[in-house]
Amino acid sequence: MPSKVQRINISFPKRLVDELSSLVPPGKRSHLIVEATQKELQKMKRLKILEKTAGAWKDSNHPDLKTIKDACSWVNQLRQSDEKRLREVVKSNG
């Protein structure tokens, strides 16, 4: 079932409309504007989440991850653990 569409009236600077008209063929402009708006709204949502969660990570709560070397070691341990589990799954299905 197609989603509902609502027409809205938006004002653009003439220079931008001229550029849009020269680069995007008629019938494709609405799609381009909708896609660009969706991307920008997603970015705004991510920024809002980052603002809300700023300060949630406290170094004092994670003394084992104070340096880049510590973080790399932790990531390597996760990868090795995943590889081990994968080998076990393959072995049991083999």
Image (cartoon, rainbow, N blue to C red):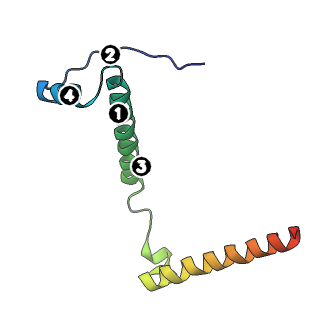
Which residue position is annotated with label 4? 22
Q: What element carries label 3?
A: helix
Picture coordinates of residue 47 (x, y %)? 36, 49
Q: Earlier in the sequence, mark 2 or mark 3?
A: 2
Query: Dot 1 surroundings within 10 Å: few (below 14), some, or many (20 or more)?
Result: few
Which residue position is annotated with label 1? 37
* Res. 88 image quadrant: bottom right
Picture coordinates of residue 24 (x, y %)? 28, 29
Q: Please name the amino acid that badge 3 sits on.
A: Ile
Q: Please name the amino acid that badge 2 sits on.
A: Ile
Is residue 67 at least partly visible in the picture?
no
Query: Dot 4 surroundings within 10 Å: few (below 14), some, or many (20 or more)?
Result: few
Is residue 34 at least partly visible in the picture?
yes
In the depicted view, which residue is nearer to us: 59 or 7? Answer: 7
C-alpha span from label 4 to label 1:
20 Å
Q: Is mark 2 on a helix, strand or loop?
A: loop
